[in-house]
Image (cartoon, rainbow, N blue to C red):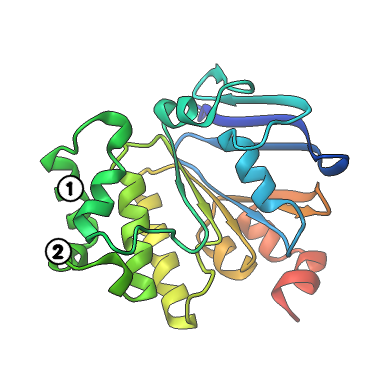
Amino acid sequence: MSEKKPLLEISNIDTYYGVIHILQQVNLRVDEGELVCLLGGNACGKSTTLKTILGMVKPKVGKIMFAGEDVTHQNTPARVKLGMAVVPENRRLFAPMTVLENLKIGAYVRGEAAEEDLERVYELFPKLKERSSQLAGTLSGGEQQMVAVGRALMSHPRLILMDEPSMGLAPKLVEQSFEMIANLHSQGVSMLIVEQNANMALSVADRGYVLQTGRIVLEGEAKELAGHEELRRAYLGR
């Protein structure tokens, strides 16, 4: 079996906000077709890691490789054109626009949305086809999550970055959200999930990293991390 190629590789990243040192020597990798989770509590640097990968925040030190290209000094639109797509925290849909209009925005970097792209999203999320003319702001939290993921898929991404997919969802909807993530992963979609809910994230991931005060303190196969004593105490409960 051929070894998987790294799709995203960040090496020795140091990121600052002014004089505050947020990320310290962070190393992280996502291979083609892999689902990786980045775990940690509030204010540990998870969102800053995502923003650094997307080019919204520039690292002071380190290197970011994506799809075989050095993107360390490229801006966010250039990285999106290479195949990064984000599902932001709290979905951030355009509430006064319809589901269909929100989905079409996802294809903006490629030009006009193709009918087959919409059909693929509707096949994954049949409910969105039923709701296509409904205003996005009137949908339930779970339905809004589907729109946010569908919008990301419309750009034909090589990597989907998800920021706190369980944020603001009721427990039942959290389960549905991670079922959706597992389904996407089973179809070969590469993903990096930034998440506080370690239990759910590790249940669907291949590998994981744990971030604490800007440093990676644990990394490994998801099954190994789920059984790690320190992680269980800190995030999974006893």
Camera-side residue of 160 and 140: 140
x, y percent for residue 108:
29, 36
x, y percent for residue 163:
55, 55
x, y percent for residue 112:
19, 34
Mark 1 against mark 2, which lies toward the viewer? 2
158 versus 232 height, above or below = above
Residue extending farthest to the top is 69
Res. 133 mark:
2
Tell me if mark 2 has few (under 14), some (14-19) or many (20+) residues whose alpha carbon lies within 10 angstroms of its own: few
Residue under the image location 75 percent in, 25 percent down: 62
Q: CA distance from mark 1 to mark 2?
A: 14 Å
Among the two numbered marks 1 and 2 on one chain, the one whose residue lies closer to the N terminus: 1
Residue under the image location 88 percent in, 40 percent down: 19
Camera-side residue of 3 and 128: 128
- Helix, strand or loop under label 2: loop
Does residue 177 appear left or right of residue 25 in this picture?
left
- Residue indicated by mark 1: 118
Q: Is residue 207 visible?
A: yes
Does residue 101 appear left or right of residue 50 in this picture?
left
158 versus 40 height, above or below = above
Q: Is residue 209 visible?
A: no
163 versus 166 height, above or below = above
Residue under the image location 49 percent in, 81 percent down: 171
Kindly indicate whether the residue at mark 2 contacts the one at mark 1 (C-beta within 8 angstroms).
no
Place residue 129 in its image quadrant: bottom left
Tell me if mark 1 has few (under 14), some (14-19) or many (20+) residues whose alpha carbon lies within 10 angstroms of its own: many
Does residue 133 appear left or right of residue 110 in this picture?
left
224 versus 105 height, above or below = below
Residue extending farthest to the front is 96
Does residue 198 appear left or right of residue 212 in this picture?
left
Q: Which residue type does callout 2 highlight?
A: Ser
- Helix, strand or loop under label 1: helix
